[in-house]
Image (cartoon, grey):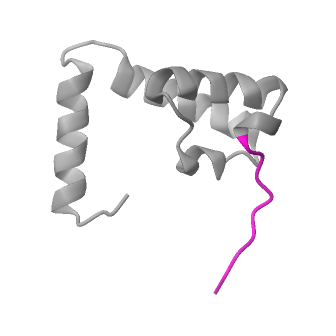
Amino acid sequence: MSYFLKITEPEKSDGQLQASYDMLQTMFQMVPKVFVAQSIRPDLLEPVVQYVNRLMVETHALPRTTKELIAAYVSKLNACAY
């Protein structure tokens, strides 16, 4: 079964969505497609972006590189292609 989502690409965004995309661009040097797929609800995307920033980017108990290695290892264990 195929679905079609009316997404907004980063270069065509504005307002709240543009702010979320800008933050993602800063965090990842790109806007991952998994976030673009959520562009249909910018009001829900913004808190997700804030959460990812706090969880993965900001340094707390572990540095970002360690957190990303853990995430990559868990993805490998789960056979996740993403």
The residue drawn where x is 22% and y is 63% is 78
In the rendering, at what x and y percent does residue 19 appear? Answer: 71, 22
Task: Name above or below for residue 56 compared with residue 40.
Answer: above
| 2, 61: nearer the viewer | 2
Q: Which residues are magenta?
A: 1-9
In the rendering, at what x and y percent does residue 74 appear? Answer: 20, 51
Quarter containing the N terminus: bottom right
Q: Is residue 55 left or right of residue 40?
A: left
The residue drawn where x is 53% and y is 34% is 30
Q: Is residue 50 left or right of residue 62?
A: right
Secondary structure that dominates the magenta span: loop
Quarter containing the C terminus: bottom left
Task: Name above or below for residue 63 compared with residue 13.
Answer: above
In the rendering, at what x and y percent does residue 3 appear? Answer: 70, 75
| 51, 1: nearer the viewer | 1
Q: Quadrant of residue 9?
A: top right
The residue drawn where x is 65% and y is 37% is 45
Q: Inspect the magenta stretch and tell me whether residue 16 lies in it.
A: no
Q: How many numbered discs sit on the rendered protein? A: 0
The residue drawn where x is 19% and y is 58% is 76
In the rendering, at what x and y percent does residue 17 appear? Answer: 75, 31
| 63, 29: nearer the viewer | 29
| 21, 30: nearer the viewer | 30
Q: Is residue 41 left or right of residue 76?
A: right
Task: Name above or below for residue 75 compared with residue 54.
Answer: below
